[in-house]
Amino acid sequence: MIAHIQGKLVEKSPTEVVIDCNGVGYHINISLHTFSLLPNTDFVKLYTHLQIKEDAHSLFGFVEKSERELFKLLLSVSGIGASIARTMLSSLDPKQIIHAIGSGDLGTIQSIKGIGSKTAQRVILDLKEKVLKIYDLEEISMTQHNISREESLSALEVLGYVRKNAEKVVDKIIKENPEAGVETIIKQALKNL
């Protein structure tokens, strides 16, 4: 309903701002990321998201449109409300959140206050494909795994193992430990081949 608000910045704190727009002061909730991007001028424009509940109408503001879109994506996940979504955007840079979702990095998402393992898993499960499609991240999330995987498989082939058998073992190791480096993958594969 309200796509953006621009006007004079009257009050500002790390969690909220008041923007005077033709004599009407709009109270807008913001993330620390948006706070850090607020210009030093009196005149500002924030992209907004209006949340209507039985007991409150709350405006959330963002300097960047992309942060607002990520906020909406996070709200679409069951168990994540506006306050947790804002906490996520305050704890991590939007790019870090997108990358963590795209690469299935549970640890990073769980490191955010208020998010347990089930919610973190739900975030990744619900948003991974959307994030990969919207932000075109297919390459980013898979590149590191592919490099480690290929190097490990090449080394195992040199050591005389059949590629097809090695692939199964290496894929299983990467699935269990996505952050494993080439050395770790090879050592574990040698134990299992």
Image (cartoon, rainbow, N blue to C red):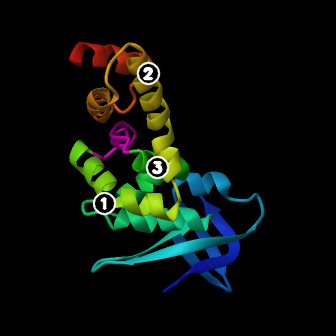
Whole-angstrom CA distance, mark 3 to mark 1, is 14 Å
Closer-to-camera residue (149/119): 149
Answer with mark 3 or mark 1, whichever residue precedes in sequence. 3
Q: Nearer the viewer, mark 2 or mark 3?
A: 2
User: Residue 168: x and y, percent?
Assistant: 26, 32
Question: Which span of residues is magenta-colored?
Answer: 104-115
Closer-to-camera residue (117/85): 117
Which mark is drawn over residue 182? 2
Residue for point 52% across, 52% down: 94
The quadrant where residue 182 appears = top left
Residue 105 part of the magenta-drawn span:
yes
Indicate the amino acid at tag 2: Val
Answer with mark 1 or mark 2, whichever residue precedes in sequence. 1
Whole-angstrom CA distance, mark 2 to mark 3, is 26 Å
Q: Nearer the viewer, mark 3 or mark 1?
A: 1
Whole-angstrom CA distance, mark 1 to mark 2, is 30 Å
Which mark is drawn over residue 126? 1
Residue under label 3: 97
Q: Nearer the viewer, mark 1 or mark 2?
A: 2
Closer-to-camera residue (12/111): 111
Q: Is residue 170 above or below residue 9?
A: above
The quadrant where residue 35 appears = bottom right
Closer-to-camera residue (168/4): 168
Answer with mark 2 or mark 3, whichever residue precedes in sequence. 3
State how many labels appear. 3
User: Residue 72: x and y, percent?
Assistant: 43, 68
Residue 51 part of the magenta-drawn span:
no
User: Residue 64: x and y, percent?
Assistant: 62, 64
Cβ–Cβ below 8 Å for labels 2 and 3? no
Q: Residues within 10 Å of mark 1 (few under 14, many from 20)?
A: some
